[in-house]
Amino acid sequence: AQSVTQLDSHVSVSEGTPVLLRCNYSSSYSPSLFWYVQHPNKGLQLLLKYTSAATLVKGINGFEAEFKKSETSFHLTKPSAHMSDAAEYFCVVSEGSGSARQLTFGSGTQLTVLP
Amino acid sequence: DVKVTQSSRYLVKRTGEKVFLECVQDMDHENMFWYRQDPGLGLRLIYFSYDVKMKEKGDIPEGYSVSREKKERFSLILESASTNQTSMYLCASRYRTDSFYEQYFGPGTRLTVT
């Protein structure tokens, strides 16, 4: 069985400072991992994905994430926050094939960026 | 660019009404999904469709049904709307069932049942 834990439900940073959104996963197989972002009243947009290639994954808008198998983590980072980064972020684990039950969403982290 | 569209952004219905939420994708994706999103509960899967005329129950299928007669269209049906179905409904599609394919989401339909 797989699971995803987003360790912080809310994160607040000042504009121009680094962002760290934490995600730990549990998986029986070699998973694929995704980060999505949801701006207010919008659908979810893919930020980046890991699918067993390079462990450091670069995404859109300056975000990146590192897959660490030993720590079962896939934390999302950005060197310098921008006001437009304020949104909710979801970590997703996907394993195997054949059923949508192989997709598990984290509960989300709300990022606030202070001026 | 993949585009997933949903028929309404906002919808207000009365208790007991039959409600149809439509989702259309334009990239010939095999898989389509319906989720509901509630504060503090994240996304919960209602139904999933592997391909045309195929469906699988998700985690919270009670009170809902789905229809997939054409590959590009996936409909969510609330047989008799109730106030506890007030929520944001998100549709998504995915190229195929393999784990490394990402989902593409529509903008969502905010449904209020009064």
Image (cartoon, coloured by chain):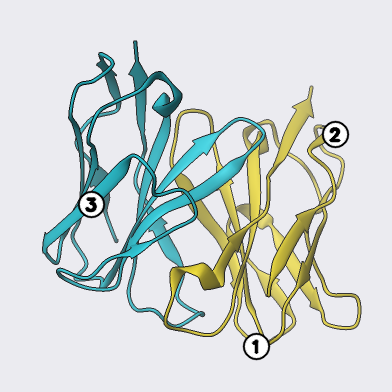
User: Along the horizontal axis of the image, is B73 left or right of A75?
Assistant: left
The residue under label 1 is A52
Identify residue type, mark 2.
Val
How packed is label 3: few (under 14 Cα within 10 Å), some, or many (20 or more)?
Answer: many
Select label 1 or label 2 by which is in front.
Answer: 1
Q: Residue lying at the far right in this picture: please name it.
A: A71
Chain B colour?
cyan
Position of residue B34 measured from the top left corner of the image (x, y, whole percent): 36, 51
> Which residue is painted at 86% across and 47% down in the image?
A18
Task: Give the vertical position of B69 relative to A81 (above or below).
Answer: below
> Which residue is painted at 85% across and 50% down in the image?
A7
Image-quadrant location for residue A58: bottom right
Task: Give the vertical position of A100 relative to B40 (above or below).
Answer: below
Report helix, strand or loop for mark 3: strand
Spatial CA distance of label 1 from label 2 is 31 Å
User: Along the horizontal axis of the image, is A45 left or right of A63?
Assistant: left
How packed is label 1: few (under 14 Cα within 10 Å), some, or many (20 or more)?
Answer: few
The residue under label 2 is A13
Colour yellow belongs to chain? A
Tag 1 subunit? A
Q: Which of these two is toward me, B94 or A5?
A: A5
